[in-house]
Image (tube, helix red, strand yellow):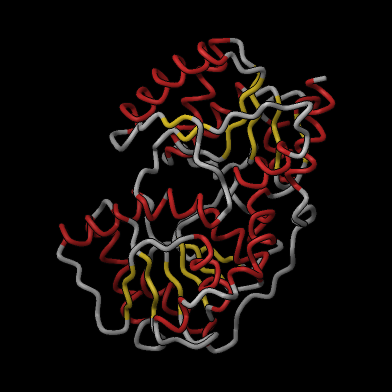
Amino acid sequence: MKIAPLWNAIKAFPSEFAPVFLHTGQHYDIAMSTVFLRDLGLPKPQFNLSAGSGSHAYQTAKVMVKFESLVKKINPALVLVVGDVNSTVASALVCAKERILLGHVEAGLRSHDRAMPEEVNRLVTDALSDFLFTPSRDANDNLIAEGIPTRKIYLVGNIMIDSLIKAKAKAESSTVIACLGLTNKSFVLLTLHRPSNVDQLETLRSIWEAIEAISREAPVIFPVHPRTKNRMASFGIKPGPGVILTDPLGYLDFLCLEKTASLVLTDSGGVQEETTYLGVPCLTLRENTERPITLTLGTNELVGINPKKILARASKALRGGCKKGERPPYWDGKTAQRIVKVLRHHLR
């Protein structure tokens, strides 16, 4: 979702850019990789590092070794990385050591919780980047507070919203609502995948207690991440009749569900942003978020993992007592164009 707008914006200047599309293979499941390339109109990546799964250290190291070999071969003028996953920080470290210009899209986001592996990835990547493309003013403030020179920081908006705006009309033709036997605004959509939520039995049981209670008020649609599916099986957690499990969904099908749900429950950063843009009530099953603008301006609320609190806020939202939000500045579908404008100026 973050690469597609950039790819299209860069390809609009064939005389100035010769882009190379690299897939690290960190996400390798067909439903979480290939389907997204198709839905977003992206070409087959020119290179795939096939990093696969593993511990944070193993996965990061594997991407570093393979990426280093590739950049020595193709010698890029600049590398663009997105988000906060292990592939992001691995690529950033290689670029720093090989003296290659680095641009980070979605820079400056902070949860201020270093227990989150993604927070460490964000801090390291931003410290090493030459171009820091931020989605909101709070991200600029974070970078400045960390001593990043302002000349490196560019407020460009939210790249995820570029993809959402382009795909919104197409998502309306999705048949997923009918296939699941649903009607608009009659269900709750759930995503749950963060290790801090699904890897510990007591935490997952606590969240699941609330999910089961909510499912007695409205059907809960749950596209299950492979990691979560494995943990639920190992912990013996079996969904009740009100929870409808599906395989991971493509971008268009998920967007269709997201925009027509009565309420979204999530621990995903991207979903917090998408629901804010769509005006859909969102409850985040975490104690903190690196996207505070979704709290101050958007439709998002933090509810943590306490089942009573989750149920109380969900019940209120389903009765119409949801938070009304607004769209943050620069979330207008033109983020990729702003990034490419900066790159054209500097790479000349």
Kindly indicate the quadrant of the structure image that contains residue 59: top left
Question: Measured along the vertical axis of the image, is residue 182 above or below residue 190?
Answer: below
Q: Where does the image place residue 189, in percent across and percent down from the top left?
A: 45, 73
Across and down, in percent, residue 11 comes to 71, 37
Q: Is residue 54 above or below residue 346?
A: below
Q: Quadrant of residue 237?
A: bottom left
Image location (x, y in percent) of residue 24 = 44, 33
Of residues 321 and 77, the one nearer the viewer is 77
Q: Residue sitting at 42 percent across and 37 percent down?
A: 117
Q: In the rendered image, which quarter contains the C terminus? A: top right
Choose between 178 and 126: the one closer to the eye: 178
Q: In this image, 210 relative to 21: left or right?
A: left
Question: Residue 57: x, y in percent?
Answer: 33, 27
> Residue drawn 72% across and 27% down?
17
Vertical placement of 213 versus 76: above or below? below
Which of 160 and 50 lies nearest the eye of the viewer? 50
Q: Is residue 138 depicted above or below 40 in this figure?
A: above
Which residue sits at x=35%, y=87%? 216
